[in-house]
Amino acid sequence: MISQFKHIFFTASLRKFPNFPSVLPLPHLKAFSASHVLGGKMELAEAPDRTLLLLAGKSNEENDVAKVLKDNNTLQLRKNGEEVEVILPSEVETPFEDDAFRIGEYFNSLSTKRFGRLLIYSPKLSSTHDVISQNNSDLPVGTVCVADVQLKGRGRSSNLWQSPKGCLLFSFSIQMEDGRVVPHLQYVVCLAMTEAIKGICLEKGTPHLDVRIKWPNDLYLGGLKVGGILSTSVYRSKKFYVSAGVGLNVGNEKPTTCLNAALKRVNPLSRELKREDIIAAFFNKFENLYDVFLKQGFQALEELYYQTWLHSGQRVIVQDRSNDQDQFVENVVTIQGLTSSGYLLGITDDGQMCELHPDGNSFDFFKGLIKRKMS
């Protein structure tokens, strides 16, 4: 089925393909932070004088790593100008609030070998993404930072957002060597989350939630955005240190909607989904998908990805400059999928293949796209 035409306006300039690994962070990894939908752009609260970080591991091995990180005073947020207080579970003096993230429940549902096994938890901090990105090279692969409240969530163009309780907010560390596949990582993260939600609904016996992917990194439910992904990378010592952040409206109905509100609309007696179950299910899915991605490439996941995204067969009106650069010419492009470099693949009515890039300015990736002809 072909969707209704949507107006998309292209700029005249052409963006060249990124040269790996010289251009960092990669342009199309600078994506939406989910927090700008999970919360709202507002006057931001001040970060706490000291940011509390609790380190916990699923097994003795990760707990030993946590102790070393604490003893060596490894975790810092110097770029934020924040002091950090790091504690271990045995050092918790005052119990956290009743609606705090339940670490034990999370670990009980986690079945991974690498991802999510070392946890950094904070009841309130500026940004989970900052914790991971500023310490990535010192953290084991798969370390995850989770917060109940996020005061300065990261977004595109340096936008900052506040995220309230009820959001699932986390970022985790990845290390990659092949820069050519790094741009597709955010698609694997999106796919893992939609598959996790599908699996949790089936496991818990709740109504199905048809969460879909809006390219490149947003999650939609019933026409409303309920989450998104932010991925950034730094190249150092022949490795890409990638920080992947996820935000998902689980229990907060504002400013758009949330998963539990959607469940209640279908069945008022439905069980609510828990943040701990969703993030554990995410890592259980992500680890398997990531292994396939590294061994076989994103092509092995494309069919499943296209079943989940919103854009197959979508026809869009594009506006490009004429040869004399004085006038605009409108063309119709039908979206076919993704190119090998991770951008949108389109075809004009006269059969011309083209690649569509975001211009990096608009909050809606389907406005201000840049067209590049393909040979």
Image: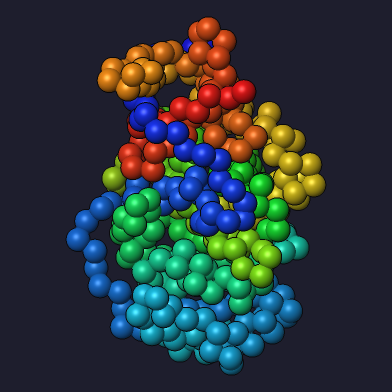
The colouring scheme, among rainbow, by chain, secondary structure or one colour, is rainbow
Q: Residue at point 36% right, 36% down?
A: 364
The image quarter containing residue 96 is bottom left
- Residue at the extreme right of the image, as rendered: 295
The image quarter containing residue 71 is bottom right
**Could you tell whether 196 is left or right of 113 in the image?**
left
**Residue 158: % across, % down:** 34, 57
**Residue 260: % across, % down:** 43, 44
- Residue at the extreme top of the image, as rendered: 350
Instruction: Please determine whether, in this image, residue 140 is positioned above or below residue 352.
Output: below
Q: Residue at point 38% right, 71% down?
A: 125
- Residue at the extreme left of the image, as rendered: 43
Q: Residue at point 49% right, 72% down?
A: 134
- Residue at the extreme bottom of the image, as rendered: 71
Taking depth in this image into account, of 373 and 116 the one nearest to the observer is 373
**Residue 2: % across, % down:** 49, 12
The quarter of the picture where the C terminus appears is: top right
Taking the image as drawn, is residue 230 in sight?
yes
Instruction: Please determine whether, in this image, residue 197 is positioned above or below residue 247.
Output: above
**Residue 170: % across, % down:** 50, 60
Task: Give the number of marks.
Answer: 0
Instruction: Please determine whether, in this image, residue 125 is positioned above or below residue 286.
Output: below
**Could you tell whether 181 is left or right of 45 in the image?**
right
Q: Residue at point 57% right, 19% down?
A: 353
Taking the image as drawn, is residue 252 in sight?
no
